[in-house]
Amino acid sequence: MRAELLPVAVLLIWLSWLDGAAGATKNKQECAVPIGTIVSAKGRVESASSPGTGWVEAAAGTSLCAGNSVRTGRDGQAAIWLISEQTMVRLDISSAVTLGKRPDARTLMDLLRGAAYLFSRTPKQLDVKTPHVNGGIEGTEFLLYADLEAQRSFIQVFEGIVSAKSIGAAGQLSVNTGETVIAQANTTVRKLSADNAADAALWRGLVDPVDGIQWTLFYPQIGVHTTELTELLRAGDLAALRDRLGNLPESDETVALNLLIDIVKARDAQARRRNLDRTNEAAARYPASNSIILVQTYALQATGQVEQALAVLEAFATSNAPDAATNLRLAELRLIGGDVKGAAAPAAEALADPSTAPRAHALLGFMALKRIDLDEAKQRFDASIAMDSFDPLPRFGLGLTKIRAGDETAGRQDLEFAVTLDPNVSLY
C-alpha cells in the first residue's frame, strides 16, 4: 500500500552519510505512568483529564493518562503515541478519543467520533471501541471511523486481524487483512464487499484503500499561493479540494495540485509512469510555472530518476525566477546528490519564507549532521518540529542525531515517530 516519494529522498540522504523535541506543553497531565503522548498537533487540538471536565488547548509534548480525552476541531489533527504499544494514532479533523486501561493492563482506545488511523512497525495488541462496535486488534495498521450522524462505524484492516463485536446486538466477526466491517446501532456487525455497489457507496476506502487514509499522507510544498487550496491540502480534505479544483478555471496551480495528489497516492509502477507522462505534458503547457516544475521533479523521483529531477530543476532555475518552494526543493535534491555546499544557498533562501522555513531548517539540520555538528543539527531539527510537528523528515534527522550522539534509545524512538507519521513511508 505504501508508495515512494519522500522516503526515497530520506533513504538516499541517510545511506550516503551512514557510511562516511517537542513543543511547549500547554496542558501537562499529571499521573504516575502516562500511557500516551501527543506527538504532533495542528489547528485546534484540546484535551480533558476526564469526562465532564473542561477542555484546554493541547500541544505537542502533552502527556496523556488513563481516562484522558483528546479532540480535534474542524481545522485540527493530532498524532498520539501509545507508549506501551509503540503505536501511533492519527486523529482526523472533528474527531475525539478517550484512552483507558483494562484490568489486564491492555490499553483501550475509545473513538467517540471521527476517524483514527493506527500504525505500528511491529504487530501490537490493543482494545478499541466506537459507539457501535468493540474490537480487539492485533497487527500493524488499522483505520476506525465513527459516524454519529449516520449511527454507524467502520473498521478497516490494512494489516492484522480484529475481533469485532456489535454493541447492542449479537454477533462477532474475525476481520482479516484487506477486509472492512460496518457496525450500525443495534445491528449485527458485517463485512463489506467491494463487489457490492451499495457497500462501495457506503465506504470510499473499500475500492481504493488509500482513499480512507488520504488525510494522513504527507504532501510536499509546491508553491501554491491560494490559501483556501493549501489549507484543504494541509488538512488532507482531498474530497473538498478536488471539488473546489473542479469549480475553478484551469491554471498551473490547479493542474499542479491535481497531479500532486495522484503522485502521492500512486502505488504501482504503471501509475507512477502515467503520472510522469502527465507532468511532462503539463510542463510543456506551463514552462515557467514553479508549481508544475516541482510536481515534475516529484514524479521523476517517484520513478527513480532523482538525478534527472535535479537536472530539470537546475535548468528551470537558470532561466526562471525560483520561488521559496522551488529553492527548497533545489536544496533538497542537491543534498540528496551529496552537494552540501550547493544546497546551502537555496536552503537559506527558503528559510526566509515562513511557508518553507520548517523544511528548510530540517535540510540545514542534515547539513550540520554531515559536518558532525550535532548541537546545530539538533537545534535545526527541533526548530523544524516546533514549526511543523507533522513533517516526518525532521523527526528522522533528530533520531539520527541522537543515535550519533550515543542516545540510541531516544534516537530510535524518533525514527519510529518519523515512520508512523507518514503511512506512505516504506523505505526508512
Image (spheres, rainbow, N blue to C red):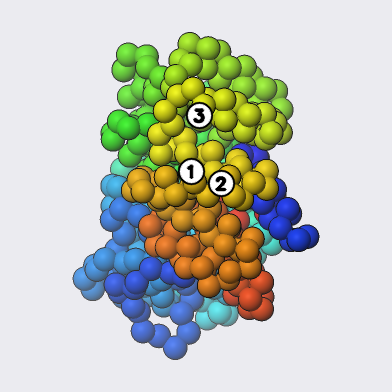
- Across and down, in percent, residue 110 comes to 43, 63
| Residue in the image at 35% along x and 45% along y | 353
Numbered badge on residue 343: 2
- The residue that label 3 is drawn on is 317
N-terminal label among 2 and 3: 3
Q: How many marks?
A: 3
| Residue in the image at 51% along x and 68% along y | 376
Amino acid carrying label 3: it is Ala
- The residue that label 1 is drawn on is 346
- Across and down, in percent, residue 151 comes to 36, 45
Amino acid carrying label 2: it is Ala
Choose between 208 and 6: the one closer to the eye: 6
- The local crowd at label 3, few if under 14, some if 14 to 19, many if 20 or more residues have their Cα within 10 Å, is some
- The local crowd at label 1, few if under 14, some if 14 to 19, many if 20 or more residues have their Cα within 10 Å, is many
Numbered badge on residue 69: none
| Residue in the image at 31% along x and 43% along y | 149
Amino acid carrying label 1: it is Pro
Element under disc 2: helix
- Residue placed farthest to the right in the image? 19
Answer yes or no: is residue 394 visible.
yes
Choose between 93 and 255: the one closer to the eye: 255
- Across and down, in percent, residue 413 comes to 60, 69
